[in-house]
Image (tube, grey):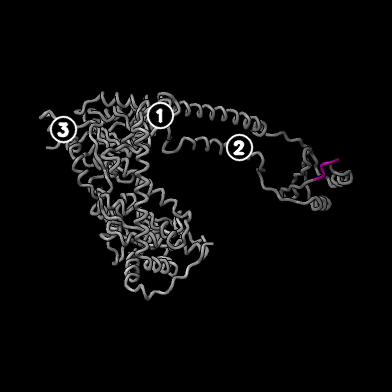
Amino acid sequence: MQPQSPPPPPPPPGRESKGGARGASARLGGLPRWSLWVLVGVLLLGFVLAGFFPSEPREDLTYSEFRTAVLDGQVQDIEIDNNNGDIDGELEDGTLFTTTGPVDGGIPDEDLRILRDQGVEVSYVTPSPSFIAAILPYIIVFGLFIGFFIWMQRRAQGQMSGVMNIGKSKAKPYDTERPGTTFDDVAGYEGVKQEITEVVDFLRHPEKFAEIGARIPKGVLLVGPPGTGKTLIARAVAGEAGVPFLSVTGSDFMEMFVGVGASRVRDLFQTAKKMGKAIIFVDEIDSIGRKRGAGLGGGHDEREQTLNQMLSEMDGFEATEGIVMMAATNRPDILDPALLRPGRFDRQVVVPLPESEERLAILKVHCKSKRLAADVDLNTVAKGTPGMSGADLANLVNEAALYAVRAGDDEIHNRHFDMARDRVLMGQRRESMALSDQEKEVIAYHEAGHAVCAAVLPHADPVHKVTILPTGMALGVTQQLPEERHIYRQDYIEDSLVVRMGGRIAEEVVYGVYSTGANNDLTGATDLATKMVREWGMSERVGPQAWSGGNQVFLGESMMASKEYSDDTARVIDEEVERILREQQQRCRDTLHENRNGLDLVARALLERETIDGAEVSRLIELGRGTAEELPERESVTTD
């Protein structure tokens, strides 16, 4: 019988439901609190405006019409306003009227005489403003003054509440009532799922482990390259176990105030303990879990205090309490050793880049909501994307969908996946870049040199596509599709060096001079040859010795470390790197001389069509070998 799930966690302190006291104070009778102030304002405005509108309707007359009515004996009495000269009166038939008389100097004496002769009763009034109109300016000023102080008080309270809550954890809780992520949502990675199934079993059936005396690891560290789905796997563990999930990133602990990180760590673990069973997930833990005291001048004091508090909290609870801590990083080499010792993060689960079958499963997940054409073979796409992570594959599918929309198609075709793969691997094509004919020919022979070496050498990766169109940061690209490999033999690495040098040597064979286009090729070849000698033991003179790459993570760490080898050994390493590069350069030169006709054919095809595929490269090389005597003489543009 499965144990009952723990009750949902109580709301955090200071937060109550809408039906509580806070909700009753925030709303009155189902209306917002500010509606009362709006009602008061409307009533006040009604009282003010009432004094400016006449209580009885009156007929508007011009002064000339009023004077004519007086001469005709139709006016009974009038009332003259001393402030603005307005005249209100009543006609003999009872009609009320109003008109505007002269303000400066009052009514002319002649008009007054006419009024007396006609027997019109004349009275003068000086109206005083109403009480509300009189005090309205004072009310407005006083109201603005009070409102300003209320706003300042609320702002201060908000800042104080923010300061008081600054030590609270920023973890996002995902309880069991929300739709959870399970292992079915994680495509592939069956080995990883199997390895962390123990955590799920412990959270579901802790009594089985308690009976036999077994302890589940307190911490599980997910290690893998970016984009492999470490966060998704952690959520799937919580979804399978049916327990609350607290997610936080390493940077959420850091703040400008001293001691805030440690306070947030304490609050995080206290929140987890209140939930009973829970999973605490810290993403990018390397931001706070770096080695203490490493680098020039020591470590960051606030970061170290946060790490010390986390280590203390992990020692403060037992594994039988039902709290499991999970973390993710792609740099386990920079983590503090205290984090990785038994009793803390004592289990590391490697989440590698997906294999071909796993890539196929990931592609199927991302293509569920996409409309695919009949010519799309996801198995072929999966085999043609080695080294891509789950995030890369999701981006690939989205790019293919975008290309389909741009082309006006209602389905995603295979050509759209090819275009998306080229976009992801090689970069965006630069249509606006204009090259001269001379530069195009140099680039064509450069890329043809890479392509010929890759197609001829037995251990090199096959050629997929060659183009002389400016793409990404390169003026031309030779794209190879590497096969699925987990170890690299020396003959494969040596052929890779030959392929890297193919562009530079092709320029030497054809033109007799070099260009700057081989800068990136030489950098990669030198780095590869250095690793052969210093790290992989592929040099007879150096022998079976290996040293690290020498790239220290922290500034100043190399100053504190002792020298790994003597100056004589460093000289031997440099000589061996130079020897390997020169030997592979000569191999490349011999290869291109043997396939000179194929080199010319590939270069001409690139100049004519700008882009050719790997099958066309192989066909042109075979054509060059079989019909060498029938090829016309090569015409080239000189570089002078």
Name the residue that disc number 2 marks: 47
Q: Image quadrant of residue 191?
A: top left
In this rendered view, identify the residue nearer to me: 484 or 107: 484
Q: Nearer the viewer, mark 2 or mark 3?
A: 3
Kindly indicate whether the residue at mark 3 contacts the one at mark 2 (C-beta within 8 angstroms).
no
* Residue at image mark 3: 206
Note whether residue 250 is visible.
Answer: no
Mark drawn on residue 559:
1
Could you tell me which secondary element the residue under label 1 belongs to? helix
As measured in the structure, the alpha-carbon distance from the residue carrying label 2 to the one carrying label 3 is 73 Å
- Please tell me whether mark 2 or mark 1 is closer to you in this view: 1
Crowd band around label 3 with a 10 angstrom C-alpha radius: few (<14), some (14–19), many (20+): many
Q: Is residue 554 magenta?
A: no
As measured in the structure, the alpha-carbon distance from the residue carrying label 1 to the one carrying label 3 is 49 Å
Q: Mark 2 belongs to which amino acid? A: Phe
- Position of residue 8 in the picture relative to residue 583 (left or right): left
* Amino acid found under the numbered disc labelled 1: Met
Name which of mark 1 and mark 3 comes first in the sequence: 3
Element type at mark 3: helix
Residue farthest bottom in this picture: 630
Tell me the crowding category of disc 2: few under 14, some 14 to 19, or many 20 or more residues within 10 angstroms, Cα based: few
Q: Earlier in the sequence, mark 2 or mark 1?
A: 2
- The rendered magenta stretch, by its main secondary structure, is classed as loop
Residue 639: give x, y in percent of width and height. 52, 62
